[in-house]
Amino acid sequence: MRLALDHLIIRAADPEATLAELAQRAGAPVLAEVEEVAGMASGIVRAGSIDIEVLRIGAEPPERPLGYGVGLLADLPLDRATAAVRRLGFPTSAPASASAGGRKWRAVQVHGLLPRPLKVPASTKPPGLADRLAGLAAKVPGAARLATKDPGGSMVVVTEYGFDAAAWRATAGSGPAALEVHVGAAEHLGDWQRLQLDPDSPLRLKADGPAGVQKVVLEGDREPFAVGDVAFEFR
């Protein structure tokens, strides 16, 4: 199994304002306006081959936007990818379904790659009945809101799209390419090295600095800026 970088997640108290700032300053086209999804609010801009998602999650909003997480895409169906990740010793949640704007997808939360992950039940046992029951429970709106009440300090997800994501993304244009994505893995740097990551990935994993997304280097010649704790530079 090989994992590729699919999207970045910036946690923000005001996703609409943060999304607008990111689009304007980075020259990144808006792929999805902010919409309520399963107890969260999410909007997306496009940066080359990846999405940058701005997410409101949790009962207590952060004082400033945070480089909250990373979304990965497997070259296997999600159920098989979940089993493979668990065999490597990483606890994952059960696959949870979500939908917005006519689009449907499933995702699992992966623990053990960034500190203080989103507090959802996770297991290293082979996927089975317990996962199917947990997946059904996650579809209940009240359960979804409860699961996201305490977002912890980070999120790493593996996503499977139930629609033509490439065609949908093409409607917005590519935007500036993401040349590098610097992520602080803290004490989990060695754990990332156990994964089979796409060798062409822009991910640059490091042990120093704050945990989570620290810096994004985009193609272009605009002025550098920061969105909360996430720095944006151009090359």
Image (cartoon, rainbow, N blue to C red):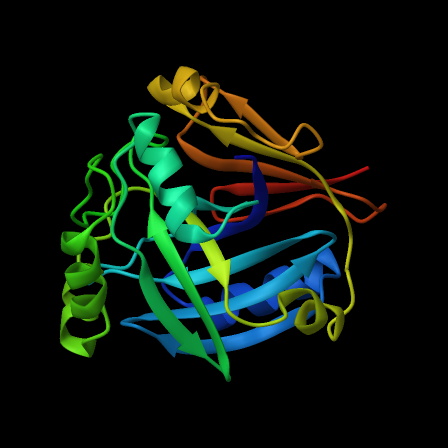
Above or below — where is 135 with respect to 177?
below
Could you tell me which quadrant the C terminus lies in? top right
Percent position of residue 206, x then y: 51, 20
Residue at x-position 20% and y-position 43%: 122
In the figure, residue 134 lies in which quadrant? bottom left
Judge whether residue 227 can be spotted in this image.
yes
Give the camera-side residue of 200 and 84. Answer: 84
Percent position of residue 11, x then y: 40, 54
In the figure, residue 97 lies in which quadrant? bottom left
Q: Is residue 92 left or right of residue 101?
A: left
Give the camera-side residue of 104 and 181. Answer: 104
- Specify the farthest residue to the right: 221
Give the camera-side residue of 174 and 153. Answer: 174
Above or below — where is 234 with respect to 94?
above
Residue at x-position 58% and y-position 42%: 5
In the figure, residue 67 lies in which quadrant? top left
Above or below — where is 91 with respect to 136?
above
Above or below — where is 40 with respect to 118?
below
Percent position of residue 216, x then y: 63, 40
Q: Is residue 102 left or right of residue 87?
A: right
- Total count of labels: 0
Percent position of residue 47, x then y: 70, 54
Give the camera-side residue of 81 and 43. Answer: 81
Residue at x-position 39% and y-position 35%: 84
Q: Is residue 56 left or right of residue 172?
A: left
- Specify the farthest residue to the bottom: 102
Judge whether residue 65 can be spotted in this image.
no
